[in-house]
Amino acid sequence: MTEQSLSLEQLRLLASAAGAAPSLHNSQPWRFTPMPDSLGVQVYTDPDRAVPLTDPDGRALHISVGAALFNLRVAGLRLGRDPEVRLLPERDEPHLAGTVRLSRPAPSSPPYGRDLFEAIWQRHSSRQPFANRDVPEVVLGELTAAALGEGAVLSVLEEDGVRRVLSLTGDAERRTHADLARMAETRAWLRLEAPAADGIPAAALGPQDHDARVPMRGFTGRTLSTSPSQRFEALPQLATLSTHGDLPADWLRAGQALQRIWLLATAHGLRASVLHQAVEWPDTRWGLRDPAEGVGHVQLVLRLGYGPPGPATPRRPVDEILDLTGFRDARVGGESSC
């Protein structure tokens, strides 16, 4: 049995991996601290980095933190430890999203079918056009199974479903552009000039000329000189990610499922981006559900395909997201709990 306290170096690796997760507008709404016995990591939501007009219920915030939780699990396996996750463990600590305990040795075979650690650093949102090339059924099957493994449902859409979701996304995008307060909130996360540790740089925006075939989010409300007109794929490969419930624990599960899917897709050479607009309005979100099934709650829409990798987006320094108050590294003078 491992039962060995995490060192400072290991904690920094874990926080760095967790901080590479995706988040709405790259807001990075998380912070981490060692568990009291230094055998794991506590994961907190950071309400100061919320996007309240676009995400009033905190759904996207929790999905982002869930993605960070999954990265922690993958990084824990890289350290030779088996991650044990608890979601929302303390009722009197509403910002404590979960804990990842790393006190046991890792299993002998990768629990996710393959080692996903390197994919953490290779995964980026790609808002560029993809090739008109189908994703193989066997790969889609792996991604669907990955979602189920996290308690979520990935529904790969047929042509009629794709067109329905694109229409809803387009409607939501137009509504957002007409909402001056929401657009101002979105623009507040743009980082078009000076380097920054969060937000969206110009290189990551993708084309901003609003190709009607795939309504990607228009962050600026105008065409940038750095964003030439491009044609998107004729019929994108879309999938909805749903959960049976619609509470914070379900959103955290959706985030873990999203990241597991995305890392596995990255390992297969796929690119991905999230079409989030339609889940931001209650009526269009309701319309995202499969009318034939009519169950579950759609948490996001994922676009998959083959194309150029998205650029890396800035990340907050580890010292900003990892709180080491009270921590003593057992390897530099603290007492070991071996």
Image: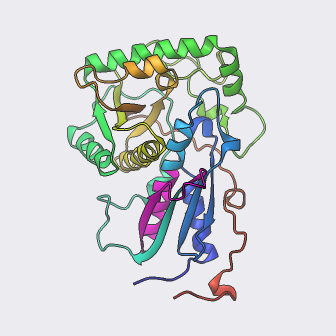
Q: Where is residue 295, by image quadrant?
A: top left
Q: Residue at x 68, y 51 (%)?
A: 316
Q: Residue at x 48, y 18 (%)?
A: 215
Q: Classify 309 as above or below 235.
A: below
- Can residue 292 be seen here? The reply is yes
Q: Quadrant of the N terminus?
A: bottom left
Say if the magenta span includes residue 312.
no
Q: Residue at x 40, y 47 (%)?
A: 266
Q: Classify 104 as above or below 185.
A: below
Q: Classify 121 as above or below 77.
A: above
In magenta, the rendered stretch is: 67-96
Q: Residue furthest right?
A: 194
Q: Is residue 187 left or right of residue 165?
A: right
Q: Residue furthest front?
A: 92
Q: Nearer the viewer, residue 132 or 79?
A: 79
Picture coordinates of residue 292, whole percent (x, y): 22, 21
Q: Classify 71 as above or below 242.
A: below
Picture coordinates of residue 338, whole percent (x, y): 51, 88
